Amino acid sequence: MDWKVLESSYVFKDHWFQARADKCMMPDGRIMTPYYVLEMPSWTNMVIITKEEKIVLVRQYRHGKGSTTLELPGGVLEIGESPQDSAIREMQEETGYVSTEIEFLYQVSPNPALHNNTAYFFLARNAEQLAITNFDAFEDIVIETYTQVELKQLLMEGKLQHGVQIGAIYQAMIRLNWMSW
């Protein structure tokens, strides 16, 4: 079932991603060339639930979509950093929230047909805004909190646009027993 890579070369490289062109042999002997793979950094996201049982989301401009989106705080997994440490760091940097109740939700391949990266999702419970935010140089973030009812309304209205994150939000809602209407 797996393909065999016969040749591989990079057609583009920079800090954010690398594009690789592979020549692959399928199990039946057919050759697929070029098959492009984007090597992208893995990332982490945190579903943050406050002591008041509100979810913390961040609003920021996303140039690929050309609009401002509402999403989970998170960011790139740094080299040598564990996914959990990355999620905790991103939570504190982007929102100022801290929590000692962190649990792993799951990991997923955002687009396994073309990308080689992994997204890791965590849940922080009973979070408090105790730290100072520390945005990256090009981050322009607004921190917002929503009740369970408001979150469900955002989901029903399609207001959360980061497709990979929606599964993590639902997973957290299941663990928190927030799924009843």
Image (cartoon, rainbow, N blue to C red):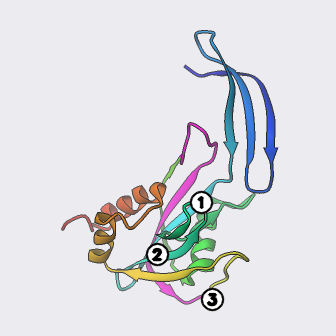
Q: Is residue 24 visible?
A: yes
- Tell me the magenta residue range: 109-132
Queried whether the magenta region covers residue 3, the answer comes back as: no
Residue 57, numbered circle? 2
Residue 132, numbered circle? 3
Residue pictured at 63% horizontal, 21% vertical:
3
Picture layout, residue 93 above or below residue 16: below
Secondary structure found at label 3: loop
Mark positioned earlier in the residue sequence (3 or 2): 2
Label 3 neighbourhood size at 10 Å, few (<14), some (14-19), many (20+)?
A: few
Instruction: Quadrant for residue 167, please give it.
Output: bottom left
Left or right for 109, reference 138:
left
Q: Quadrant of the N terminus?
A: top right
Mark positioned earlier in the residue sequence (1 or 2): 2
Label 2 neighbourhood size at 10 Å, few (<14), some (14-19), many (20+)?
A: many
* Residue lying at the far top of the rendered structure: 29
Left or right for 134, reference 54:
right
The three-letter code of the residue at mark 3 reads Ile
Residue pictured at 80% horizontal, 37% vertical:
10
**Relative image position of residue 127 (x, y in whole percent):** 46, 81
Q: Nearer the viewer, mark 1 or mark 2?
A: 1
**Residue linked to disc 1:** 64
Q: Nearer the viewer, residue 175 or 167?
A: 167
Secondary structure found at label 2: strand
**Relative image position of residue 145 (x, y in whole percent):** 41, 82
Residue pictured at 59% horizontal, 60% vertical:
64
Queried whether the magenta region covers residue 124, the answer comes back as: yes
